[in-house]
Image: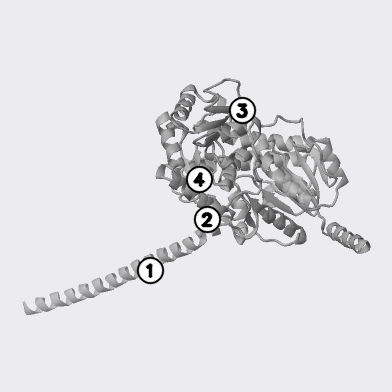
Amino acid sequence: MKHVEIVFASIVLLVQNVSSLNILAIFPYQGKSHFFVHRVYIQELVNRGHNVTVISHFPEKNPPHNYNDVSLAGSIKILEDDMPFQKSYLTVIGAGIFLTTSGKQNCEVMLANKNVQNLMKQKPKFDVAIVEQFNSDCGLGIAYKLGAPVVGITSHILMPWSYNRFGIPYHPAYVSFHFLEGGTKPTLYQRVERTIFDFYFKTLFYFVSQRSNQQELAKYFDDIPPLEELARDIKVLLLYHNFVLTGSKLFPANVIEVGGYHVSESKPLTDKLRKFVEEAEHGVVYISFGSVIKSSTMPDDKLQAILGAISEMPQRFIWKWESKLKLLDENKLYLAEWLPQVDILGHPKTLGFLSHAGMGGTTEAIHFGVPIVAMPVVGDQPSNAAAIEESGLGVQLQISDLTKENLVKAFRTILDPRFRENVKRVSKAWHDRPMSPLDTAVYWTEFVARHPNATYRTAAVSVPLYQYWCLDIISVFSTTLIIAYYLISLIKRLVCKKNNKKLKQTSTKENKRRSKRD
C-alpha cells in the first residue's frame, strides 16, 4: 500500500511539473488598491504550481519557491490616502494629467531598474505574460522582447483608449464613461461632456503617454513595434466586470469578465470591533472611501452633514478615518485608520455601506449582499456609482448634493427591508456563474499559454476607421444619389428643351396659317 501511495504521489508531481507554466506578470503602476486585486490572482497561479515572476512595487515578504519578485520597491512613492475628498472638472482634468505623468514615470522607473535589466539580459522563456492595462503600455514592449503572448488584466472598468484596441463599440449615448456620471442613460449635457473628455483622455494617452513609452523603450531596444500594434495583439483581456453589476456590454470573445475574484470569505471580527458590532441593537453601517481618497480631508460642511446623518440614524457606524480626531461618541461611531473591510461587510449585522464606489469595495459589497450609498469622487467611481444604482445594489449621492437630509434619505432607502431583500437577489445572481471568477481568470491564462500563436481578437480591430463608420458605403450611396439627381435633371432639361422646340415650331406654323388667311 505504501508503494502505491509513493507511485501515486510521483504521478501527481510529474503531472504538475509537466503542466507547470513559466509566467511573467508586469505591474508597473504603484497603486496599492490595484495590486491588492491582482495579488489574489497571482497567488492562485502560484498555488496551482505555476512559476510566476512578478515585476511590481509590492514584493512578497515570504514568497513561495515558485514566486519570483522583480522588485521596484522604493523607486517611487506608493499611492495610498493621497487624494483629497473633492470632485470637480478640475479633478477630472487632473486625472488625465496624472495618468499621463504616472504612465511615463512608471515606464522610466521599470526600465531603469537593475533587476528588470538583468531579467531582459537573461531572456528566460515565458509561456505567457500578464500585463496590466491601465496608464502605460511599457510592459507590452518587455513581453514582446521576451517573446511571450500577452494576457491583459484590469482591476477596473475599461479605460477610454481600450475600446479601440479590443474592437469594443463605444457610444456616448449608452456606454458608461470611466470618469463621468450618467451611466447608460446620460442626458444630452452628459453626452456632450463625455464626448469632449473622451477626446481629451485619448489625446493625452496616444500623444503623450504612449509616445513617451515608445521613446523610453527605444533607449534600451531598437526593434519594438508601435505599442498600439502590440496592444491590438493582446490575446485575452481579463476585465474586472460582471454584467450583473455593470450591465450587458458588447464584448468580443477575447474579453473575459472576471469581476469579483479578489473577494475572500470573511473571518470573525476581533477585540473592540467585534464587541462594537455585536452589541449594535439596530445593526451597523460601514463608511470607507478606499485606500486612495483621504476622507479626513473633506470640507467641514460635508463632514458635519455626515455626522448629522449618523446622529439621526439608530444604527452604529464604523468609519475608516485617517486622523486621530474624535468625531462622535465611541458607542455610536467606531473610527480606525485601517479596518478589515471584507470581515466587516461579511458580518450579518452590517446593513449598509457608504462608499466612494471603488470597484474593489463595490464587488465586496455585492459579494456579501450589502447595499451601498455611492458617493463617487474620481476615476472610475462615477461610472461604478451609476452601475450600483442601475443594478439595484444601492443609490447614488453626489458630493455636491451631500447634506444631512439627503444622506439620511439615502440611508433610509438602502436600509429598507424590501430594498435589502432585492440586494440579496442581486448578490445571488452575482454568485450564479458556471465557473468562479478566479477559476475563469486562471483558465484563460492557461488557455493563452496552450495556444500562444492563435489570435482571437475581433475583426473590428483591423478595420480602418473609414470602413468602421461606413464612410465608404455612405460615399457610394451619396455619389449614386448625386449622379442620379444630375441625370434626372439633365433628362428633364432635355425633355423640356425638346417640348419647348415643338411648341415653338407649332406656334410658328400656326402664325403662318393665320397670315395666309389674312
**CA–CA distance in space, label 3 to label 2:** 38 Å
| Chain-order first, disc 2 or disc 1 | 2
Q: Locate residue 70, reporting x and y percent.
A: 81, 40
Instruction: Tell me which numbered mark, 1 or 4, is placed earlier along the sequence.
Output: 4
Farthest right residue?
3
Q: Which residue is mark 4?
A: 388
Identity of the amino acid at label 4? Ile
Is 396 or 413 nearer to us in this picture? Answer: 413
Quadrant of res 348: top right
Q: Nearer the viewer, residue 95 or 192?
A: 95
Q: Secondary structure at mark 4?
A: helix
Q: Quadrant of the C terminus?
A: bottom left
Residue closest to the eye, 59 or 175: 59
Type of amino acid at the residue the image marks with label 2? Ser
**Mark toward the viewer: 1 or 3:** 3
User: Is tag 4's residue or tag 2's residue first in the polypeptide sequence?
Assistant: 2
Picture coordinates of residue 309, whole percent (x, y): 45, 29
Pointer 1 residue: 487
Please say whether residue 183 is visible from this viewpoint: no
**First along the sequence among labels 1 and 3:** 3
Tag 3 residue: 336
The residues bearing labels 4 and 2 have C-alpha atoms spaced at a distance of 14 Å
Q: CA distance from mark 2 to mark 1?
A: 48 Å
